[in-house]
Image (cartoon, coloured by chain):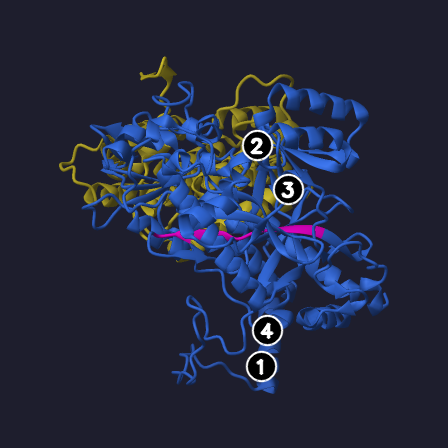
Chain colours: A yellow, B blue
Amino acid sequence: MLSRIAESLFWIGRYLERADDTARILDVQMQVLIEDPGMDERTSCEQLLSVMGVEGYTGNPNRWMMLDLLAHNPDSPVSIAAAIGAARESSRRARETLSTDIWAAINTTWRGLSTARAMRPPDMFNWVRNRTAMISGIADSTMSRDDGWHFYMLGRSIERVDMTARLLSTAALASGPQVAWPTTLRACGAYESFIRAYRGIEADRQAAEFLLLDRWFPRSIVSSLAEAERALGNLAASGQRSGFSDEAQRLLGRARTELEYRPLADIVFDLPVEMERLQRSCAAASDAVSARYFAESEVHTWRGGVMI
Amino acid sequence: MDTSELFDGYGPVAGFDEMFEGTEVRPSYGQVHTSFETMGADEVRLRADSLASSYLEQGVTFGVEGEERPFPLDIAPRLIEADDWDHVEKGVRQRVLALEKFLADAYGPGELFADGVVPRDTVVTSPHYHRVVAGLEPANGVRVHVAGVDLIRDGNGDFRVLEDNVRVPSGVSYVMTNRRALSAALPEVFADHRIRPVSHYSQQLLAALRKAAPAGVSDPTVVVLTPGVFNSAYFEHTLLARTMGVELVEGRDLVCRSGRVMMRTTQGLEPVHVIYRRIDDEFLDPVQFRPDSALGVPGIINAARAGHVTIANAVGNGVADDKLLYTYVPDLIRYYLSEEPILRNVDTWRMGEADQREEVLDRLDELVLKPVDGSGGKGIVIGPAASKAELDELRGKILLDPRAWIAQPVISLSTVPTLVEDGIRPRHVDLRPFAVHDGDDVFVLPGGLTRVALPEGELIVNSSRGGGSKDTWVLARPSDPDDEGEIAPTASPVSGIAQSAGPALDTDAGEIHVQEQEQQQQQILSTDRPPSSSTGEEEPTC
């Protein structure tokens, strides 16, 4: 398929997942702020903004500023509004390859954004989760399992690893983990699965283990890494190039085995640092995918009628 | 609201109205009129609103200065009777065939110049005449793969040709989307009529494009070439690519290698054989035309010249769209086909001819003056609506470059009932039927794009001037066989297989009630919480 379209699909997957996960992270953060008496609003918001990679804001961070930067403000590149806008723009550029259903679902989400932004924050987050789930559902049932699908899934999985890592960092930073972990599990829609898997026993360590390592839960980091590797494997298999030299696959595979083969205690000892490392692996993998599959689509420039 | 209010205040209509003859409803519109009256104003508005919102959700838009706007679709359909359509269809086909022969001749032997049909100057001085493609023989002889011929109905209800578009005519996507949207909005009205389908257009186009592939290519790769998302017709480009199942490419996706055109894919470069381009000539190849164009593909003309790729529509077709050439088309039909023109032109004066120019300059305030290479209503001056200063400026322009202008009488375009603020009112319409030439036959899509001027009295019906559109129904005769492309419903009922069910559920209401009570009891006893927590609401965080 066209490199440019492949790139669009990859980013549709990433942006939609990002909108979904940002809503989840904010939901946790807002709940923690309300429920955790030991929480200092300013520190907590500062920590979250830093985990989300926001820098250069002015003034003392509070929940309203956090909501503006991470949810509402379309000019803030890490906001939900920006992610939905970018997903819609990528979809428009790949319009001919998307089914009408999936395009209409994305377009309607984008059009509904201004209404959603007027809602109470928990309602808006709920709306974002529902809309993105609906789009994933339509994609799942209407997209052919061709390269386009694999690029979409690759983008979605890489983003999910990256964002779940950020989510875990915020949980680890909360002052009272007894509040943070159940809320984090809920944000991932993992609470019930977790309770069932561990027969009702709750502990921070198990919660971290579940979200990091569970092979059966689809939002865990290891599951998402495996999903990304599968997508890459499918893409490589359908091409003529051979060998196991795919850089992205190597990076993701290494990140996964480092999680799976090291003692859990090592990983949770300094979770934020571990999670940052994981995010760097995701960024490097994303670059490697670009270099291998999308480089052909780069805009070329003209000078005096000669291609440079 | 009173049901009759909808059409109150409709007449009297000055020119030719397609639904009403005086105060009488024409027979062909009888059922539509009755249906609307029966529905009543409120219901009609409700459906019009849902129509508009469905277009917004689907993103059926066109671009104006880079901004996406919803494409307005009026709820009242326009009907064309079978006999009228036959006439239009034959006329459009005849015109396309004559223009094909003209283009082949003008870029080839030039016999028409020798025979004095059209002055050589008229053609070679056109800004759209491209010497670079002279002598380039298209693969199956087709240059006009797609044509959009703009028609109007005059005061007598006769169809007349306003202009030909054989470069990159747009709008066919709205013909297809309008049909689907309107049949969803007015299912009962739709069911009352036998309407010829339009959904198979893309397959006709794809077949024609495949037939235009370079010699020796048995399974050609066809692509649609778009200038990109900021183009006003981007929606159409995506729809055509999607419904043909081909790639939609931008210039930067293509590259020429040793006289062949390749596209950049995730698996490397892959060959392209037929390019349905939606980019104007001037932007197509920076090597041949504008060196600053980043929309095109350098070397694409050479690849076409080498016979490795087909560009559709052919480069240089613009000479046939030139409004000065338009005035010669009836002569071209007689010259190339030895037939009389089926569809008449609008009367036109050529400003390049002194006696005609004199006459027009005396009557500037009565006529419509059009620049010959303008499109989309650009530069048109409507005499009766222009100020003295504007007319003086126009006079200066005409004297400076007479070849650049034609004049036509003000024609009162026909009107069709249209839903506006006050109810249903007459509004001016035109019609753009679309034709596809595959080398053997010219297929004319039944209907076409009806554009409607929404402001009262407005005569220019462009989308960029706040124009809307109408679904255009070509009625089939009762004796006509079902059209190709329409899937006939199966006659025999399909015998079903029983659906599987889950575990047996107790349906005895009394027993369920008892169970419910017991379960709630149980809950109160064991958890000391109100029974509402069993309904699935989220519990507060522990």
Q: Amino acid at mark 4?
A: Ala
Quick one: label 3 or label 1, which is nearer the N terminus?
A: 3
Q: What is the CA distance from the residue labelled 4 to the residue labelled 2?
A: 44 Å
Quick one: label 4 or label 2, which is nearer the N terminus?
A: 4
Among the 4 quarters of the image, the one containing residue B290:
top left
| Chain hosting mark 4 | B
Quick one: label 3 or label 2, which is nearer the N terminus?
A: 2
Tell me where residue B328 appears, x and y as whole percent.
51, 40
Among the 4 quarters of the image, the one containing residue B440:
bottom left
Q: Residues within 10 Å of mark 4 (few under 14, many from 20)?
A: few
| Magenta segment main secondary structure | strand
Q: Residue most toward the left?
A: A243
The magenta stretch is B428-438
Q: Mark on residue B512?
A: 1
Tell me where residue B323 appears, x and y as whole percent.
55, 36
Residue position marked by numbered label 4 in the rendering: B191
Q: Nearer the viewer, mark 4 or mark 3?
A: 3
| Chain hosting mark 3 | B
